[in-house]
Image (spheres, helix red, strand yellow):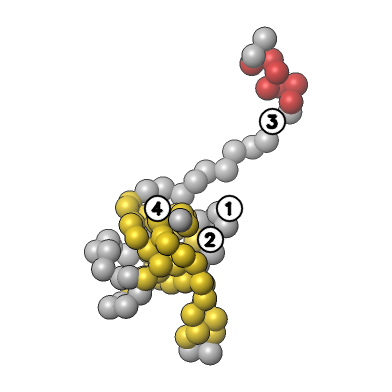
Amino acid sequence: MAQTHGQIDAYDNFQVYLGGCPGECFPSGLVYPAEWGLPFGTTVELYGTGVGVVHMSELWILALWGTSMTPSTCLVAVQPVAWSTLKRLYK
């Protein structure tokens, strides 16, 4: 099972183009099927059954076969802390 977050950038009758969130490992790509019904610009959490590539307009594009897509937010990276700082929390 694959999972990612991203923003719906475009869609048509066959696919959704999902722009990847900063710092997450799934880059922009296509999502199948396209019957999700969410508006452009919605940030979503997407689950799918597989990841592959498709050939379109002389390009190879990453594709995910989705099973569910719900509104969500991108993950927020945190700053690393020194081990000594963390140890003080548990004294």
Of labels 3 and 4, the one closer to you = 4
Which is more N-terminal, label 4 or label 2?
2
Q: Say which mark, if any, is on residue 81.
A: 3
Asked which secondary structure carries label 1, the reply is loop
Instruction: Name which residue lies at 28% across and 78% down.
Output: 13
Quarter of the figure that contains the C terminus: top right
Which is more N-terminal, label 2 or label 3?
2
Can residue 17 be seen here?
yes
Which is more N-terminal, label 1 or label 4?
1
Instruction: Name which residue lies at 51% across and 72% down.
Output: 52
Asked which secondary structure carries label 3, the reply is loop
Asked which secondary structure carries label 4, the reply is strand
- The residue pinned by badge 1 equals 23
- The residue pinned by badge 4 equals 45
Can residue 29 be seen here?
no
How many neighbours does mark 3 have within 10 angstroms: few (below 14), some (14-19), or many (20 or more)?
Answer: few
